Image (spheres, helix red, strand yellow):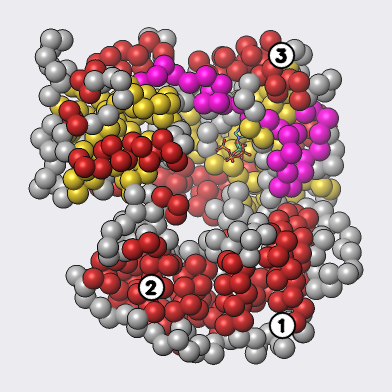
Amino acid sequence: MSDSTVRFGLLCSMFQAMGRDRSAAKKRKRFRTFLDRVYTDRDYFTAVRLILPFLDRERGSYGLKESALAAALVDALAISKDSDDALRLINWRKGGARTGANAGNFALVAADILQRRQGLASGGLTIREVNDALDQLSLKEGRGEKAAVLSDLIKKTNAVEMKWILMIILKDLKLGISEKSIFHEFHPDAEDLFNVTCDLKLVCEKLKDSGQRHKRQDIEVGRAVRPQLAMRISDATTAWRKFHGKQVVAECKFDGDRIQIHKNGKEIHFFSRNFLDHAEYLHGMSDVILHNVLVDRCILDGEMLVWDTSSNRFAEFGSNQEIAKAAMQGLQGDRQLCYVAFDILYAGDTSVIHQSLTERQELLQKVVKPSKGHLEVLLPDNGLNDHRPVDESCWSIIANCVEDVEKFFKETIEKRDEGIVLKDLGSKWEPGDRSGKWLKLKPDYVHAAADLDVLIIGGYFGSGRHGGEVAQFLVGLAERSDSTSFPKRFISFCRVGSGLSDEDLDILITRLKPYFRKNEYPKRLPHFYEVTNNSKERPDVWVESPDKSVILSITSDIRTIKSEVFAAPYSLRFPRIQRVRYDKPWNECLDVESFRALVLSSNGN
Ligand code: ATP
């Protein structure tokens, strides 16, 4: 069949069957059969982009996450916002009689509603027509226009087809088969080619013949490359053992956005990990790149951060976009974008990813002239570097023994950085690799901050496996009036979900369930809780009263972050539940003052 005649229904049948297949091998075979039987003209891209929607960069973003999609579907179906179906869509995460067993899976909740409204018969849309409609959806701006495209699709599909369209829009098909398996089944060289081009269309067009091998392609300026990644490691000794006999560099792990800078004459691209081009960085960064990158064509690998000139340190993670926008508007303040280049992948007319890291670092030093607080270069302090980093501290060392790694790690943590990355200096840079040439060591995995005993004050419904049940908690710190009486108020502190086994979570939920009260904020905010006005962090249920609740021992990354979201002055990064303290009475919850003292002492004040 040719690309223009293949029915979308055929693809949906394959998806449905894959959902039933138990083994990955069966799913792979089904994919192969689909390609061979259906696509006789081998014009695969239109289908493959629907199977791997999260890798497709031909189409812009839909701007539709579940909640926006729910609102657009309510409009598309022309139903009242207060109707049962609308409420089920809007409250897709929550369980109960209305949402049923599908809670937590938006597409299934929607399909259930659509089933009663759409006929069973397929509308006969072709894959090409579905792609055209999805193009329209991404191009339309307002909710009304998007709803019109969805409404048209609903008319031309049945509920099963529409369910898959929604999953494609949400870019998660939940097929139980990895991207790697799909690529390998498609063509033995597909993954490699995708990693160096990040271009699904090109992969589908170049590798039509699965029997014919493709000459390994190198990276090119202007085309995003899948980044080399780091493997997690639990402690310095294990890391050292893994790198046995190799020359190792230990670098500070910066907490910003991984960005590849591609410079081609005056043309500059800033590709993120998801190979999106962040043009918003152009205003704040292009001058310094043009002046301080001394070759015409090159690719740099590094981290985009925000440098705060008043505090002389990098700003906390999360302000890149805001500062990039301020630069676009010509606004100047204490904060500016700062790129830390830690690798070079291409210079002049040559890819250098096959050279060793030592050689690449030498090249990086020649090619990039640092500019304090704007463009920094990460080179080992005891090796090549004669440039002092902007914060005057040491960002990178050559480690000669495990003690060097431990010392550097400790210093990094004391500075409250995210952790360290260890790299084999003899290794080449490999697109998409996470096999252990780079190892990351973060405090979270090594030893956590002191256990903090906090009280559960609310719960959030989970999604997926935990759909319809509370799966995360809002925990609070006590506000103590004097040391003799019980606390009367609890201040929201952070949201925590991970750390408990399914079984322990079940036991905890069973215990708390009788005391969960639906959140009808602000009318019914219990007077003993204090939260901010940030609606995002308001829980789905409250615990009726503190004395009915349970204490959790939580740990976290040693770093605390200043909280704007929660009512307590600080919150935690990467909190994790250590255990449930059924043995500890609710009134022995950690109080705000003690926590503040703990933060100050760990900051060395
Ligand atoms: P994490 O959430 O721990 O950042 P990740 O999955 O985003 O992990 P990993 O590949 O596991 O990414 O860890 C490496 C990431 O650390 C890089 O993507 C980069 O953004 C960041 N990073 C910060 N400093 C460095 C550095 N010196 N060398 C390499 N990566 C660094």
Please name the residue that numbered disc 2 is placed on.
112
Camera sees residue 565: no
Please name the residue that numbered disc 3 is placed on.
402
Circle 1 SS class = helix
Q: Nearer the viewer, mark 2 or mark 3?
A: 2
| Quadrant including the C terminus | top left
Q: Is mark 1 within 8 Å of ligand 1?
A: no
Distance Cα–Cα, label 2 vs label 3:
57 Å
For residue 460, side relative to residue 488 (left or right): right
Distance Cα–Cα, label 3 vs label 1:
57 Å
> How many other residues sit within 10 Å of disc 1, few (<14), some (14-19) or many (≥20)?
some
Q: Residue at x 57, y 14 (%)?
A: 410
In percent of width and height, residue 508 lies at: 33, 36
The residue closer to the viewer here, 579 or 569, is 579
The numbered mark at residue 38 is: 1
Magenta segment, principal secondary structure?
loop
| Quadrant including the N terminus | bottom right
Q: Is mark 2 within 8 Å of ligand 1?
A: no
Q: Does the magenta segment cover residue 199?
A: no
In percent of width and height, residue 164 lies at: 51, 72
> Magenta span covers which residues?
424-452
